[in-house]
Image (cartoon, rainbow, N blue to C red):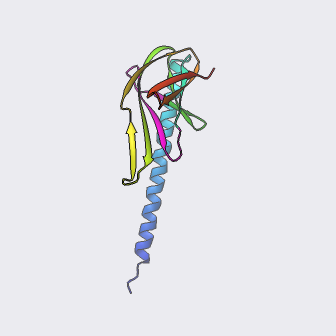
Amino acid sequence: MPDTSGMVMIYIAAVAVITVIGIFVSLSQKKKQANIAELYLENYPDSAKLMISNKGFVVSKSISVISVNGETPAYFTEKTTPGVYIRPGTSTLVVDFSSTRPGVLHKSVTKSTGAVTIEVELAPRGEYTLSFDEKNREFRVDSNN
């Protein structure tokens, strides 16, 4: 019977190295995103917070903010809720809603609105929630103030 202990040790070392690299990359990206949000707030201190309502347990529901006034959004996370900083006044957002549910014949079934352009009016330092009304198939922005 051949000795496989050397191969097992190489496999364990490879998994450990890949895990450490993955953790490092994840933390780097999180720090980079936090720096972007911090810089955005320094430049626009009166920015409004637009929290993103992502719900679902069996059916995963997700809203993505693709752009804000043609620019990359300044994402942040407050507790476990993602959000975007937006300058006060009228802004144009490109957003997307998708829902994924387990399938019967397929692994999963995903439905998406595709990129939708909406206009929002936000007050300085206001707090809002972006949600999707599935019944009426439209995005909603509600004030949290």
Name above or below for residue 39 compared with residue 80. Answer: above
Left/right placement of residue 121 relative to residue 144 reads left
Q: Which residues are magenta?
A: 55-74
Q: Which residue is outermost to the bottom?
A: 1
Residue 99 percent across, percent down from the top left: 44, 40
* Quadrant showing the N terminus: bottom left
Residue found at x 42% / y 21%: 118
Q: Which residue is outermost to the right?
A: 145
Residue 67 percent across, percent down from the top left: 40, 26
Numbered marks: total: 0
Residue 107 percent across, percent down from the top left: 39, 53
Residue 23 percent across, percent down from the top left: 49, 50
* Quadrant showing the C terminus: top right
Residue found at x 46% / y 40%: 29
Left/right placement of residue 19 relative to residue 45 reads left
Residue 69 falls within the magenta-colored stretch: yes
Camera-side residue: 8 or 86? 86
